[in-house]
Image: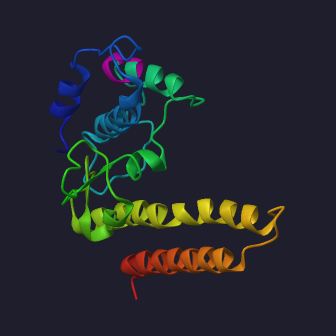
Amino acid sequence: VYSHRLQKDIAELPTVDASEKTLPTADLQRAAVAYGMLAAAYWRCGVVPNLLTRNSDIDNTLPPAILDPWITIAQRLGRPRHYQSMDDLTLNNFRLRQPAEGQADGTYDVDDVTIENLENLIPVFDNEAERVFYSAFVEIHAVSAPPVENTLQFYETLTSPDGPDFERLDSLLEQMIHSVVAANRAFAKVSPI
């Protein structure tokens, strides 16, 4: 899609109201993903396929149809300015290939969040390398979340006024080790060696 025609079409999109009255707070992250991708597509239209570095030959302004809602979305998210974050590309840009039974509402079981079971909602290059790379961030975050809670529980158990419950401490350590092993497995899936 390296054509100035697409850039013109994007520039002519209607400007969407991204205020609280039309864009629910629950949809802000996805909207940030979409507008970040639209901005990237707009800026890259007409550039040769190897994605040359932007220079003075490439217009660096965005049309109001992208810029205005994107600024509003960024402000509502508490961002200092509008930008495409790594979270926009990864953590807020996935869906499960096979959602668990009864989870069609967007909720999911953290055990289902694996590279093999993830798709990018809005791919940039739409190839397997991109899918695996972005999905690795999602899986690693998913398996790394339980140790945070485990660490808090470990501290509470260790400092209990009744004295430490060593069986509980042992169980929490095993859970943390399990999470570290799972994170290492996810890292290994993207390793070039």
- Left or right, 88 with respect to 47, comes to right
Q: Which residue, as the protein is rendered here, is positioned at the far top?
A: 21
Closer to the camera in the image, 37 or 172? 172
Which residue shows up at 57% across the image and 28% down it? Answer: 78
What is the magenta segment's predominant secondary structure? helix
Quarter of the image holding residue 32? top left
Rendered image quadrant of residue 81? top right
Magenta segment includes 23 = no
Q: Which contiguous range is marked in magenta?
A: 64-68
Instruction: Give residue 66's position: percent from left, percent from top.
Output: 34, 24
* Nearer the observer, 12 or 69: 69
Q: Nearer the viewer, residue 75 or 154?
A: 154
Judge whether residue 150 can be spotted in this image.
yes
Residue located farthest toward the bottom when viewing the structure as drawn = 193
Residue 59: name its quadrant.
top left
Q: Which quadrant does the N terminus fall into?
A: top left
| Residue 31 x/y as whole percent | 35, 31
- Residue appearing at x 26%, y 46% in the figure: 122
Left or right of 77, for residue 38: left
Q: Is residue 66 magenta?
A: yes
Residue appearing at x 37%, y 17% in the figure: 18
Where in the figure is residue 136, as x and y percent of width and height? Answer: 39, 67
Quick check: 111 above or below 170?
above
Residue 59 visible? The answer is no
